[in-house]
Image (cartoon, coloured by chain):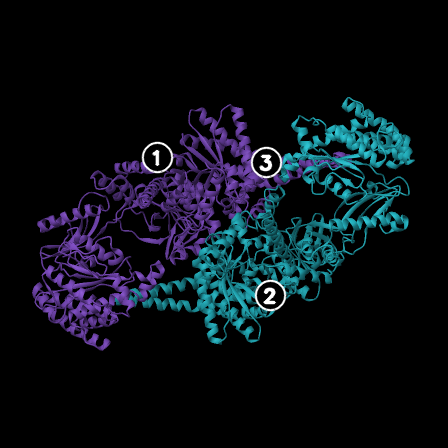
Chain colours: A cyan, B purple
Amino acid sequence: MKPQATPQKNVYRYLDGKADGNGSMKDLLGGKGAGLAEMTLAGLPVPPGFTITTEICNRYYASGKQFPPGVWEEILAALAEVEQAFGKRFGNADDPLLVSVRSGAKFSMPGMMDTVLNLGLNDDTVVGLAAQTGNDRFAMDAYRRFIQMFGRIVLGIGGEKFDHAFDEAKRAKNCHLDTDLDAADLREIVARFKEIVQTETGDPFPTDPHRQLELAIRAVFDSWFGKRAVDYRRLNKIADDLGTAVNVVTMVFGNMGSDSGTGVAFTRNPSTGENELFGEYLTNAQGEDVVAGIRTPLKIAALRDEMPEVYEHFRQVALKLERHYKDVQDLEFTIERGKLWMLQTRNAKRTGTAAVRIAVDFVREGIISREEAILRVEPNQLDQLLHKMIDPKADITVLATGLPASPGAASGAVVFDPETAERRGSAGEKVILVRVETSPEDFHGMVKAEGILTARGGMTSHAAVVARGMGKCCVAGCGALAIDYDSASMHIGDQVIAEGDFITLDGSTGRVILGLAPLVEPKIGGEFKEFMGWVDEARTMRVRTNADTPNDAQVARGFGAEGIGLCRTEHMFFVGDRIDAVRQMIMVSSEYQRLVEEIGHLHTEIEKARNNPDRAADLEHELARAQERFVRPKELFTGALTKLLPMQREDFIGIFTAMDGFPVTIRLLDPPLHEFLPHTDEEIELLASKLNLPAETVHAKVEGLREANPMLGHRGCRLGIAYPEITEMQSRAIFEAAVHVKQKGFTVIPEVMIPLVGDVNELKLQEAIVRRVASEVMTETGVAIDYLVGTMIELPRAALTADKVATVAEFFSFGTNDLTQTTFGLSRDDAGSFLPMYVERKILKDDPFQVLDREGVGLLMRIGVDKGRSTRPKLKIGICGEHGGEPSSVEFCYGLGMDYVSCSPYRVPIARLAAAQAALAAKTTEGSTHSTK
Amino acid sequence: MKPQATPQKNVYRYLDGKADGNGSMKDLLGGKGAGLAEMTLAGLPVPPGFTITTEICNRYYASGKQFPPGVWEEILAALAEVEQAFGKRFGNADDPLLVSVRSGAKFSMPGMMDTVLNLGLNDDTVVGLAAQTGNDRFAMDAYRRFIQMFGRIVLGIGGEKFDHAFDEAKRAKNCHLDTDLDAADLREIVARFKEIVQTETGDPFPTDPHRQLELAIRAVFDSWFGKRAVDYRRLNKIADDLGTAVNVVTMVFGNMGSDSGTGVAFTRNPSTGENELFGEYLTNAQGEDVVAGIRTPLKIAALRDEMPEVYEHFRQVALKLERHYKDVQDLEFTIERGKLWMLQTRNAKRTGTAAVRIAVDFVREGIISREEAILRVEPNQLDQLLHKMIDPKADITVLATGLPASPGAASGAVVFDPETAERRGSAGEKVILVRVETSPEDFHGMVKAEGILTARGGMTSHAAVVARGMGKCCVAGCGALAIDYDSASMHIGDQVIAEGDFITLDGSTGRVILGLAPLVEPKIGGEFKEFMGWVDEARTMRVRTNADTPNDAQVARGFGAEGIGLCRTEHMFFVGDRIDAVRQMIMVSSEYQRLVEEIGHLHTEIEKARNNPDRAADLEHELARAQERFVRPKELFTGALTKLLPMQREDFIGIFTAMDGFPVTIRLLDPPLHEFLPHTDEEIELLASKLNLPAETVHAKVEGLREANPMLGHRGCRLGIAYPEITEMQSRAIFEAAVHVKQKGFTVIPEVMIPLVGDVNELKLQEAIVRRVASEVMTETGVAIDYLVGTMIELPRAALTADKVATVAEFFSFGTNDLTQTTFGLSRDDAGSFLPMYVERKILKDDPFQVLDREGVGLLMRIGVDKGRSTRPKLKIGICGEHGGEPSSVEFCYGLGMDYVSCSPYRVPIARLAAAQAALAAKTTEGSTHSTK
């Protein structure tokens, strides 16, 4: 075959180890055609065939559905070469060549035309096929299947017509299985099918194989503008003018006796990554028999004994393909009378464990470089390596499915309140905490539970965020649960689950399973460590963790975290009986603040009245009275803070110690005060009696602090501005802890983060307090601490005015959870009622709380980074939203030039890998940019 | 006096009608010094004096608080010229020259040094002063005041020291009033004051007038870095290196007998604008006597009879000043022994009525051009012309002060619920509706009330927005109210107000007044019309109105509105019994939607199962059952919409008719469905019985629709996407109304606005429905309607992706209320607890819900405009947030190149004026830009 690279070439052959095209020509040949050419070129035994180009498809339409001149002749010429190569002739009654005809566009399109198999059969050639195979029934069955398929796909006859006729024949013969029909029965069915074609189309079934071929090719072209294909392209934004190619491939049969067979195999074990052929085959069978599962296939190793030569050939082919594609291959093959034919090869899907092992082995075997290995593992796959999972072999009963909010699996006894969870969990029992939704008050119960299940809330609900932080399994927003706290039970459909009943959660898929399903522990092999070592070599961006406790910090450090990017201080307020002090403070907060203002105002007035002794005396009197009234609130307010100070200091000591040598970013108090107050009547009464106040007073306070939109309310630094004493207490706790830890010989790098800044003036006020307290503590102790003061960029206005904010902030940490909420005007607590619909209907490509929205939120981030660095070129920039552990978002952060990303402990390895891949991708882009210069 | 323009000049004289400086030299001479020079140059009788420059202040500090060489000599030289000019000598015992010494920076700084008067007195010169005035007591009193003032301000002695000594002296003499002390008593006090100075400073009181002068000048310079001045500069961002000037001015006395006097006057009436001298004076008095209010001053006209020549001179001066400054002047003068001295002139403050009349009169008198006249009136002042106000002469008891949420005044009987308001209001009674806060459900009561008072909510709360829209007086967020709905009463401090008690509201100041205060009607004169005519000539940007009813539209048209920029459709849902239909629809909404989805899903599955008859049959069966269950919800859901359609159509017919010839922008349904549901148990039970449902079902639905952050929840176009039927119904109502109105011969220009778009895909889906319905209606009726489809830009993401949004949107309307909320992450409903503090403490310059935040929100708007016009250059752009009626925001919108602003009806004239001023200011800037080229 001479190479014909002229642009007029319309039909691309692949046969005899040669091909007109190759794997890179997907535009012209479609994915399938290019793949077949590539395999042929690789010297593999591929059934000969040819591909009619996508270009012809377009010209076919351009000329009013006509084959362009000369194309049919080219097809016939190619067909002749295929006959030659395969040693059979199309339409030859003795030993007919049969072909399959399939569509094949540049992108895989499930909405396109199905395959027509066995094309070339008619009343004459079927006899040849029978003789050739020595199997009359096989030939007849192939013939009736062909008519049926051709009738439905090419001639557009409703499939049920053939199905009914077939069923009728079975009934007439009183058969149950298709295989109960013999060759004579099938012959009758063929006759019946031909009648159907005649009736439905008004024409006899086309018996001329060339006519069959022409019609099938036309049908493929026509399907390009079929409704399903057009809809699919609209949805997936695929251009109409790509066109589809048509593949005409020689049929081979695995059911031609005991020297024939068919199978599927992986070049390595896709579960474990072990370097062994892995797969199954069936002797004397066709592909569909393997899929149908009627006969039990044998392990591929058995082929070694049954057909040693074929097996050896296959092993060589597999090896060759793996080397050729430099990746593990997923193979389909057929053995026809002792001859191996490769029908498909593609990169194999694999588990996370396998992906890592294979990548490492490939490097060791010299097939790929370390950098290529890094790019081979999908970051999210690492999740599987770090969490328990449900034994894939186990029989399970799925009760319902919620959102896969935090990966892993957990089983235990159901409990419905955090107190019981804490009690039973502390006693060593495994419990699953089930709540309508969780709040910070449930924290102590969540700590002791194996897993968490909620009826409401999304992927970034409190339950989800906290569970991911703890690496604990969580299924959230499982709408099918009807929880009744009073009776401590829940309905799921007809099933009632009472407290103490066992369930299992699969946080990786969202499944809720009845009973205790068997779990398997994750295995982290040496390959993982080696692989992550390469990852860290390639990586340039730092990865920190979001951690609020020394334990979380320790876990994350084990996963390779290089500091804490977000330490929330409010969770600490719920530990033990601290909440009592917090609530005491809140109860007097407004009175306290009002009196602070009143006293401040009186001082100013007295100053002004210095020339008016009468007025001054009156004011002094008023001041005295105000100060008298101030005694009690001040005692309660600052008293509470005094109680909290040593506790917070202890928290920070633990965290600083765990993060020795790495920076720790501590966010000052963020949530609205309302979140710390009790909400049920009982809790309110309990608090009232603790504080020695009337229940109505507590009730009124709870009501008074309620906000229409708490997300946009009195929270973040707005609290620290109203109550500078809180900022002061927290700063003191931070710096006293830092001094303590430094004196013990650890290296401590505190970064104090002011939340929810919208204007630089807010930051200035808070920064002044932090710096004042820091220098007070340093003066008191004589110990110097290096620290930074910065802010979270979580409001659009902070990003938009980042140039000003950066005049004060020494670092920015993008709080992309809140930034996404405000940029979209979308509450993550409420989005559950419509956001899933948005994603399903492709209004939004992804849930923006999971995958960072580059277009909107990302643009704001870019503005923030650019403006921030315009006034402070060395500004340290990171991200601490949930997106910091999501690979695509990590890549985006890398592109923005961030110094680090921060994510929950169990996502640290994922972020490390994503960061490394981003760095490598950028290198490649730079490389290619250079090469085009 | 020779002109000395050398840069070395340090002391600038003004005397004998000449001056070294002039009014433009505020940098060097400070505001006061420049003003005195300017008045002198204008030929006015100004007491001679001189100004030491700000430059000397800086050099004084630079040289370690030393007068630069030669400066003292310059001062003495200037002083000699002043002596010459005034005919008295400084320190002369017979006829001493006395001076005042004052600070004067470029910007007025209340935190700076006070004035020292009567400088130059000592034991010798006081005798001369007594002889000169023939008033021993006067001279001695001036002397003791001087020591006291000098002691406190220049020598830094605590003022109370002198006060105590003075009080002691009064006690010793058994006097009550200062005036009971005679000359001898005062002489004793002078002696005592001198002792105080000796004790406190260790030095005797400086008797040398030159020494006094030097110390006073030093004190002024020193005060520049005094704590108060520094604090003031920090707060107001005034640079430290501006420095202060020192003014040394000859003293003149209005209390030298019946041929002396002092007064203040306006060149025209500042209340009405009438062209008449307006003011008061006192014979034989000093300025402070007028202020103290001990004697009753006479009207300025009386001066004509008492001192005809002086009066005529003053009249001439006033006229001259008005011409000189081309504005009405506010004058201070003193008559010393028949000679008039002008002490101050400045542009007069005036009412809105006066401002318009004066501007028009000035044009008529040829003093200023029309353009200048337009720039002379502060847009917000027009508010006074359009609303009732409380008679300024009335005696009133202010109970409390809230936010001035909607201007005007109203009085009536207090009612606490909208039903009573509607009932009593409809019966012709004047009622004030008092609520904790209002919601759309209160609308019918608000319509019938004279004014609205709320305890909670800010300037953009529901009450405030709706009241402004109706031009109705509203005081919002009056925290002092403790409302008890059960007893239909409220406490304000100790005062209890029951239903039916009378109160008066002042919506322009926020005052809540006990009883029925007398109100005065606004007077709109012919000048207003003429003035607004000029305004419209100068204006290039359109002004529309936000109006939801034909009546509002009519009112706004009367005020010059050129279309509707925002017609909210949700208020229409509350009119009459429509709300019942709306609630019926909401009650079945989720079930309806779920079934729509289920049925759609089943159709898809059936399609997929076409080759699997068994499965298909099962699915068909399921489909039938779903469709059965669908009958009732569909009936209720679409039935409710069918009921609403003709009602909405009627609304639109009214509005289109009222706006004949102008565009009308209609926003489709925006608020979360929850807002339409009842909230109290009684209301819920009532609804349940109306809908024939169990109360628990209704309760559960109300609870189920409750959102954590409704502002960021399921609202805006998110509703229209979940329930396309609503969009369809509203579109049909719009286009059927448009056709109807067009057929009546009116010109109708509908602009359909999709709210809360965050992604162009949302807009695409909604646009498709609107356009489909529009063409259906046009086909059905055969009437073509020109219309636009556009969107509100009210989410940061819409602005950030405006290039894509504009590929679909034909117009943008910036919804700056919500855009401000999301950009700042600030709920306007909740901001009341801290935003006032932010504004008071200057963390934010203005309340961003009142004055558009240019830096943050404004930047997003600029991005939105630029990106929007990048893909659709002819994009029509407007604003429909509250800012559309706020002058500074209107100016900003003009700068962004908007086509129009839209505001509440009563603010239309304000917006027109602001838009005209913006256009003129831009012209000036362009002009000056050209001149510098």
Query: Could you tell me how far apart the alpha carbons at marks 3 and 1 are, in whole angstroms?
Result: 42 Å
Residue, far front? A2
Relative placement, left or right, of B880 versus A840 is left
The subunit letter for the residue under badge 2 reads: A
The residue where tag 1 is placed is B558
Picture disc at residue B636? 3
Q: Position of residue A266 (x, y in %)?
A: 79, 50
Query: Is residue B268 or residue B639 the one in the foreground?
Result: B268
Picture disc at residue B174? none
Label 1 residue SS: helix
The residue where tag 2 is placed is A549
Query: Is residue A459 or residue B19 the one in the foreground?
Result: B19
Q: Position of residue A274 (x, y in %)?
A: 78, 56
Query: Is residue A828 or residue A108 the one in the foreground?
Result: A108
The number of numbered badges drawn on the structure is 3
Amino acid at the residue labelled 3: Leu
Earlier-in-chain disc, 3 versus 1: 1
